[in-house]
Amino acid sequence: MSLLDGPKGTDNDVVAEAIAITKRATELRDAAIAQLLAQRQRIDRDLLTLGHVAPASPSGVGGKHSAVAAVAERAASAVHQARTTKFRSLTLAQIGRLILEEYGSLHGKEIERLAKAGGFKGGTKNFQNYMPVAFKRDGGFENIGGNTWKLKGTVEQAK
């Protein structure tokens, strides 16, 4: 029976149908909210992966948004941890190769900064003295002047 059918049914039928429709509407609303929150979490994760940090809520009020912010903060912390440990088990020559493959040519100070940010611990007291030795020992690097370094393959291709 439907509400549009008219006064054929009893009052109990109308009430029962209204309750059923309300219950179904609530279920659909809850399903829609769950779907949107799942999409929002995926979007937040993707934004964090790309390095975007959402601005803080101007109201500072907690609630569901603060739970999402807590998840986002934990994810950002995990991404930061991964960035600070990616070079931990590599040699300086391996690290230099990875950095220069990504950036092309860099000054020694920038290579040092990126290596340390990635978790490199060795030779940190005399990094600028240690780096040229490690690079020359490897043989795959070339100093193009002014303590700026390139991979040998990219130097030959540039000529």
Image (cartoon, rainbow, N blue to C red):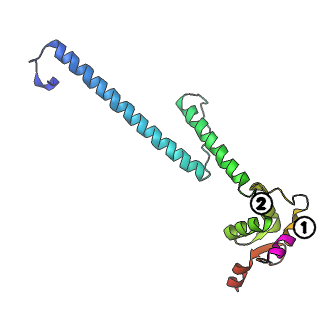
Q: Residue furthest left?
A: 8
- Residue of label 2: 115
The C terminus: image quadrant: bottom right
Kindly identify the residue that appears in the image at 62 percent across and 46 percent down: 53
Is 19 drawn above or below residue 67 in the view shown? above
Q: Which dot marks residue 153?
A: none
Tell me the quarter of the picture where residue 87 sits: bottom right
In this figure, which residue is indicated by the disc labeled 1? 129
Query: Is there any visible trace of residue 55 in the rendered image?
Result: no
Determine whether, in the image, residue 59 is placed left or right of residue 145.
left
Q: Is residue 149 within the magenta segment?
A: no
Q: Is residue 144 left or right of residue 153?
A: right
Q: Of helix, strand and loop, which mostly describes the magenta segment? A: helix
From the viewer's perspective, is 12 left or right of 115? Answer: left
What amino acid is at disc 2?
A: Ala
Q: Residue at 59% x, 51% y: name it.
A: 49
Residue 72 vs 98, above or below: the answer is above
* The residue stretch that appears in magenta: 133-138
Question: Label 1 sits on what residue type?
Answer: Asn
User: How far from the left and from the top, in percent, is residue 148?
Assistant: 80, 73
Q: Secondary structure at mark 1?
A: helix
Q: Mark 1 packing: few (<14 Cα in 10 Å), some, or many (20+)?
A: few
Instruction: Please provide percent x and percent y for residue 69.
Output: 59, 37
The span from disc 2 to disc 1 (Cα, nearest Å) is 15 Å
Which quadrant is home to the N terminus? Answer: top left
